Image (cartoon, rainbow, N blue to C red):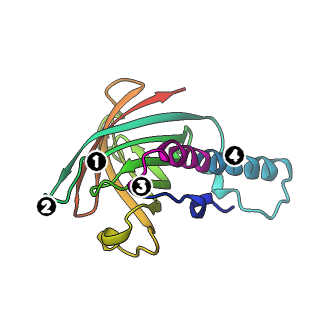
Amino acid sequence: MKLPLSSISMRVSSTSNIPRVAAAALCAVLALGSGMAAHAADDASDSSASGYSFGGRFTGPSHWRFAGSPYTLHFHPSPEHRHVWAVGVEKQWDATDWLAGASYFSNSFGQDSAYVYVGKRYPGLWGWTSNEYFAQWSAGVLWGYRGEYKNKVPFNYRGISPGLLFSLGWQFTPKDALTVHALGDAGLMLQYSREFR
């Protein structure tokens, strides 16, 4: 399945395209989730199917999570840095804690950016704590850093590069959580999320 990342194009100075990029990111997540569900249904209906069902990681009951990030701490502040914010949507499969999601954000240089990913959440920090504390990782495709900032992320090709996040969080109610994402050696992002089951 191809994600429509190459169809996302906009000028850095344009703000009229913000809904279009957010909608494209959301469509990518929905398409990813729908494609996985359809593939899993096909495998379940034919026990001799030769297709790959992602090892059962993306099947069964799931729930949605919406997230927002109002603040990012830069380890090495610069006059070039702008306020960073993010909004995102994530789908988590209950039995396996695997997830798929997308985020739309303004990067450290004020450029519209997006991140489409898969990952896994570890409630209870691998059994070390109660389930209200968790670790999470995600890996995917990052779109954004362009022009004079293209070298601010590794392996960037025409604004597209691989992305990887490691996170620690606290599920302080059954539906609400605070998460801190490590942004490589650049900084930390604080995020609030709300689950919808």
Camera-side mark, 1 or 4 = 1
Camera-side mark, 4 or 2 = 2
| Residue pictured at 61% horizontal, 46% vertical | 27
Amino acid of disc 3: Ser
- Does residue 53 appear left or right of residue 8 in this picture? right
| Residue pictured at 73% horizontal, 50% vertical | 40
Q: CA distance from mark 2 to mark 1?
A: 14 Å
Image spot of residue 191 (x, y percent):
32, 39
- Does residue 20 appear left or right of residue 40 in this picture? left
| Residue pictured at 85% horizontal, 47% vertical | 45
Comes first in the chain, label 3 or label 1: 1
Task: Identify residue for label 3.
Answer: 113
Task: Identify residue for label 2.
Answer: 76
Q: Residues within 10 Å of mark 4 (few under 14, many from 20)?
A: few
- Magenta stretch: dominant secondary structure: helix
The image's mark for residue 34 is 4
Helix, strand or loop under label 1:
loop
Question: 70 or 1, which lies in front?
Answer: 70
Helix, strand or loop under label 4:
helix
Image spot of residue 54 (x, y percent):
64, 57
Amino acid of disc 4: Ser
Image spot of residue 32 (x, y percent):
63, 51
